[in-house]
Each structure stands twice: as C-alpha cells, then as structure tokens.
Amino acid sequence: MNTLAEENYLKAIYKLSLTARNVSTNQIAAELATKASSVTDMVRKLADKALVNYARYQGVSLTKAGEKVALNIVRRHRLWEHFLVEKLHFKWHEVHDMAEEMEHISSTELINRLDAFMGHPTRDPHGDPIPDCDGNIKATALKPISAVKPNTSGVISGVGDHTTPFLQYLEQQKLTIGKRVTIKEIIGYDNTVILEMDNKQLQISRDVANNILIAI
Amino acid sequence: MNTLAEENYLKAIYKLSLTARNVSTNQIAAELATKASSVTDMVRKLADKALVNYARYQGVSLTKAGEKVALNIVRRHRLWEHFLVEKLHFKWHEVHDMAEEMEHISSTELINRLDAFMGHPTRDPHGDPIPDCDGNIKATALKPISAVKPNTSGVISGVGDHTTPFLQYLEQQKLTIGKRVTIKEIIGYDNTVILEMDNKQLQISRDVANNILIAI
DNA sequence: TTATAATTTTAGGCGAGTCTAAAAAAATTA
DNA sequence: TAATTTTTTTAGACTCGCCTAAAATTATAA
C-alpha cells in the first residue's frame, strides 16, 4: 500500500502528464502547494518503488504500475463525487474537497460495490470519465466551445476549469452537463461567443468558451 | 482539527471509558496496539489541547470537549457502517475496517446528509446506538442473555463482541439483530442457555449468551 | 560563447508519531 | 513495613514528509 502523500503525488503527476510528456519538479510543487526540494525527495521514493521514471534534472513520468495506481485514485475520486451529487444532493462545485478525502479509502471491494450501487456511471458530475476497475478510461474527444465552427451543435459534456466560481457561474447560466447548445457566431473583436440554448440566445466570453467542453 | 492519530486515541479512550472511570496508559496501548511510552506522549498532547484530563500516573479521562469529538467519530463510524450494510449489502462482520477509515472524513455537512439519506437510523448494524449531531446518544438498557430470568422474551438488539468469528457464528445460527428470542432455561452445570426462536429450540454457550444483548 | 537567470538537487534540520531501554513511581506481596 | 513486581514516565533515537539555504545543473540572453 501507498501512503497518503504518495497517492497525492501520483495523482498530481498523472494530472500533469495529460498535458506534458515529462513533468517537472516545479510543476508538481505548484500542483501540490509544496516546495521543489520536497518533490525531489518524494519522487526518488516513488522511483525506488518503481511507480515513476526519474533521472536527475530530467523530470518525471509514471510507470505502468504508477499509472495504474493513479487511475485507481481517479476512479475512486470520481465515483465518490458522483455519489455525493446523485445521492446526497450536493452541488457539483461542492464535492471536490470531500472526494479528495474519500478517494484514499482503500478497499477495492467497497469501490466496486459503490460503482454497482451507482449503476456503473461513466462520467463524474463535471463530465470527466470514470476509469473502470482495470484502469481503462473511455477516451472521449471533447472540444472547447471556442474551437468549433459556427452553426455547430453539441452537448455540454465537460469543463476545463473545476473551480467553484466558474462552476457556480455555469450553474447560474444553466450551462450544465447534458445541455445541448449551438454555436452561432464567434465575434472577431474579443472572441465572445454567441450561443443558442433552449431557443434562447446567450453570450459568453472567450475564457468561458475555452472551458466548456462539448461532444459534437 | 485533530490529526488521524489524535482521533484514534480519543476514540480508544472513549471506548475504554465505558467500563472504567480513569483509563490507564497500558489499557490504551493495548487497545491501539502501540507502546505505553507512545501513549504517554500523545496523552500529554491531548491534555494540552484540553481534550483529556491527565495527571502523571493517574490515568486519563475525556473532558467535555474530548467526549464531543469522540462521539462525533463514533457517529461517523456507525453511520458509515449502516450505509455499507444497507446500501452496499456488506455483511455485518465485513464493515468494521472500512468504517475505520471512513470515520475520519471530516465534513460535518457530509455526515448530516448521509444521516438523512439513511433515514436517520438510531442503531448501526451491530445494534450500537448512533449519536445525533450534537453527540446525544440514546441510552438503552440492553441485557446479555445470560443475565435474564428463564421464560423472559426479548429482541436481539446488540452484541458485546464485534469480532468476525463471533458475528459469523451468530449469522450462521440466524441470531441476528431484530430476532425475538425466549430464554427457556439456564443449565446450572456450565451455564448453557436454552433458547426458543422461530418456534425452534436452540442451545448456546455461556460465552455466547454473555455477548448477545437483548431488549426486553 | 560567455554571462546570467531559472530550475533542480543536496545538505541539514524540524515536528509528528513511534520505538527501546532505563529510571521513577505505584501497587502488591512477604 | 520492607522487598519485589508492575506500571508509567523519561531519555534518546528513528522514519516520514516537510522546510530553508546553498550548491549544482540546465536554460536563456547578451
């Protein structure tokens, strides 16, 4: 078994690996709100356990074993988030910190039964895919609204920003997971996007459009 | 907030306090599978935080504040056990270790919503009462089967032994929470108890009779 | 290409929580 | 009551995960 700190490092490295081949010490330190020297220590420990590939000054990547552990943590996190929203009726912006604690509960049997109890969901409340018990994750090509051509229609299926203010804004605008939207026009001046949803027009900023992901 | 170790000490002291005024260092060490010297260190730390009363060589007791924390941990533990049995269909002897981890999840709001989700249960799967959110616990006078007079009838409402082999034995004999039993006779020779349940006769040993608690 | 800046690692230390071994206090027995 | 045993505390040390400060390495700019 891995310690709490080890699990948090693996999760951070996994997350950062999605947008970079080799993750740097400083990136990990920023992600975990810790110091680079602490990261160096821990990364060597994880390398000793064969969970990451590491060479001095060269950055870090997950090994197959490390990735499996990380995907398991992600699975637990997202299943608990799903539980919190669907069964305990929390809002999607309220569940992250709780799931952050719950993801470290170790029983595999527990998580498999939770999965069954929830009806084997494929996505968490933010639209992120839930890995299965073998760590398989459904690769789904979602596009930010800002990247599609005018007159394209799609279903909101994920967000690129998980912070509370952003999620609260989306909720207020009813721009939630599952909603169908049509991109009408992208204004050249500042990339404001004009959408149609529920037969009404709506304008959103470039930043917001970058962080709403749709399936076409 | 208290650390994981602190919470575990408080819970252990609470448990031992049920059968002793002042809890000894050695008792706590045995309960937590640690060494007396470690207990002394931690107990001083808890005394500094005003969670226990402590004087060198005199044993330990919980303060009001410490008891409140302990009851909260017990509440969380028992609610999660209830969830695991009722919703995820675990057996009553399987849930202790999982709940041991889950009880440390800190959100009060989470536990209150879990409580509501479960329909405000008053007892966990072993018949132990679940404290409410203010730490009030329904005092219920349960009696071991071994301590009631012949021809008394009652409902099995708790167990005095939470170990897996004992719980599995009870399950096999269908001596589970909620079952009505009538004590027919206690044999003088070795205190074997003869019961009637579901219109059938059943014999149990003194040790078993000591650890089945009934409400009359 | 050399100087400067940024990043990463090393060295040494700290607090939490644990341990062993020895000393101190309390309880028990003769 | 004195001697012995048991319990508890103290002293000192260890690991984990973190820190700061300084050194080493790599990246960038002149």
Image: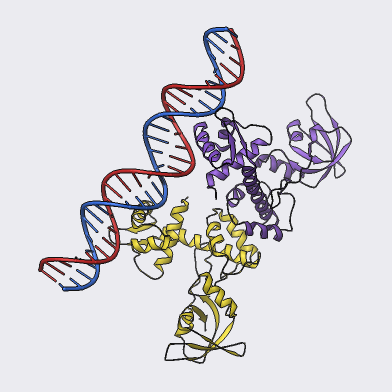
Chain colours: A purple, B yellow, C blue, D red
- The foreground one among A216 and B174 is B174
Residue name at image x 49 percent, y 80 percent: B208
- Residue C27's place in the image compared with B152, above or below, is above
Residue B66, quarter of the rendered image: bottom left
The C terminus of chain A, quarter of image: top right
- Residue D26's place in the image compared with B211, above or below, is above
- The foreground one among B88 and D26 is D26
Q: Can residue B62 be seen in this view?
A: no
- Residue A13's place in the image compared with B121, above or below, is above
Q: Which residue is at the far right?
A: A151
Q: Is residue A13 left or right of residue A170?
A: left
Q: Is residue D5 left or right of residue A177?
A: left
- Residue C19's place in the image compared with D22, above or below, is below
| Residue A116, x across and y down, in percent | 71, 60
| Residue A121, x across and y down, in percent | 74, 54
| Residue C3, x across and y down, in percent | 52, 9
